[in-house]
């Protein structure tokens, strides 16, 4: 599964070499986040229910600004599930037996996040703000001058790297046993702590 997910990430990044695709998806992610704001915890619970979970663990660590939601669902993330992260609106939940089916609710946690980690299938996929610059410059081969032109045309701040967070995934090793089928770990911005509570 790990190799399949890496291939999906690489294919998705190839699509973003076109600046119009890049900007369109960045805007779509931003707009979706606003539309689902305030529903983050509900959306996470719905995902646990849809995975067939009988047990859900929620752990909030205010010292490290970390929220972790884990479940014992009967199925780990599928390739369709990973694709639904990379492609907004491409949900893996197409039957009527699911609560969520648009593939957009998960994106609501981006409002809170500096980093989102998903642990499933014995590896971690990490989406972090810090990945944006590296991916734009080193994987997609944009130059700072090109990004500067994009920022100017789109009236973006000079420190913005305009790529959707969920297209900035990096696969990491899982160094210790994982007790759940899937865990989502959000390193959140301190300003959102009261909303999370």
Image (tube, helix red, strand yellow):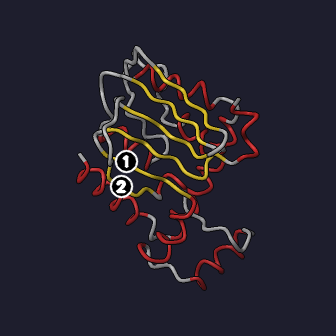
Name the residue at the bottom extreme: 145
How many labels, in total?
2
Horizontal side of 162 relative to 190 (left or right) equals: left
Describe the element under mark 2 as helix, strand or loop. strand
**Quarter of the image where one finds residue 6:** bottom left
Please rate how many residues cluster around mark 1, counting C-alpha atoms within 10 Å: few if below 14, some from 14 to 19, many from 20.
many
Q: Residue drawn 53% across and 36% down?
A: 106
User: Nearest the camera: 168 or 83?
Assistant: 168
Q: Residue drawn 61% across and 28% down?
A: 41
Location of residue 88 with respect to 68 vertically, above or below: below
Location of residue 155 with respect to 94 vertically, above or below: below
Q: Residue drawn 48% across and 19% down?
A: 99
Image location of residue 69, percent across then percent down: 50, 30
Q: Are marks 1 and 2 in contact (CB under 8 Å)?
A: yes
Horizontal side of 167 relative to 73 (left or right) equals: right
Location of residue 137 with respect to 20 vertically, above or below: below
Image quadrant holding the N terminus, namely top left
* Upstream in sequence: badge 1 or badge 2: 1
Image quadrant holding the C terminus, namely top right
Tag 2 residue: 171
Describe the element under mark 1 as helix, strand or loop. strand
Q: What number is the disc on residue 124?
A: 1
Q: Residue drawn 28% across and 42% down?
A: 122
Image location of residue 123, percent across then percent down: 32, 46
Image location of residue 88, percent across then percent down: 49, 45
Please rate how many residues cluster around mark 2, counting C-alpha atoms within 10 Å: few if below 14, some from 14 to 19, many from 20.
some
Location of residue 184 with respect to 156 vertically, above or below: above
Image location of residue 81, percent across then percent down: 37, 38
Q: Rounded to the nearest whole Å, what is the CA distance between mark 1 and mark 2?
A: 6 Å
Q: What number is the disc on residue 164?
A: none
Horizontal side of 156 relative to 10 (left or right) equals: right
């Amino acid at each position: 599964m790990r190799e399949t997910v890496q291939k999906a990430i690489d294919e998705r990044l190839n699509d973003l070499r076109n600046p119009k695709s890049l900007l369109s998806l960045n805007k779509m992610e931003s707009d979706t986040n606003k539309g689902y704001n305030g529903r983050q915890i509900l959306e996470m619970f719905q995902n646990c229910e849809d995975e067939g979970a009988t047990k859900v663990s929620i752990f909030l660590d205010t010292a490290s600004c970390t929220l972790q939601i884990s479940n014992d669902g009967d199925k780990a993330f599928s390739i369709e599930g990973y694709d639904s992260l990379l492609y907004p609106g491409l949900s893996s939940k197409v039957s009527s037996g699911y609560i969520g089916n648009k593939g957009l609710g998960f994106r609501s946690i981006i409002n809170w996040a500096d980093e989102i980690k998903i642990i499933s299938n014995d590896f971690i996929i990490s989406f972090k703000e810090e990945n944006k610059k590296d991916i734009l410059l080193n994987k997609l081969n944009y130059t700072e001058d090109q990004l500067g032109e994009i920022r100017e045309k789109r009236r973006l701040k000079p420190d913005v790297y305009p790529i959707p967070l969920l297209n900035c995934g990096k696969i990491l090793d899982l160094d210790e046993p994982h007790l759940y089928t899937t865990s989502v770990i959000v390193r959140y911005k301190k300003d959102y702590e009261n909303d999370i509570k």
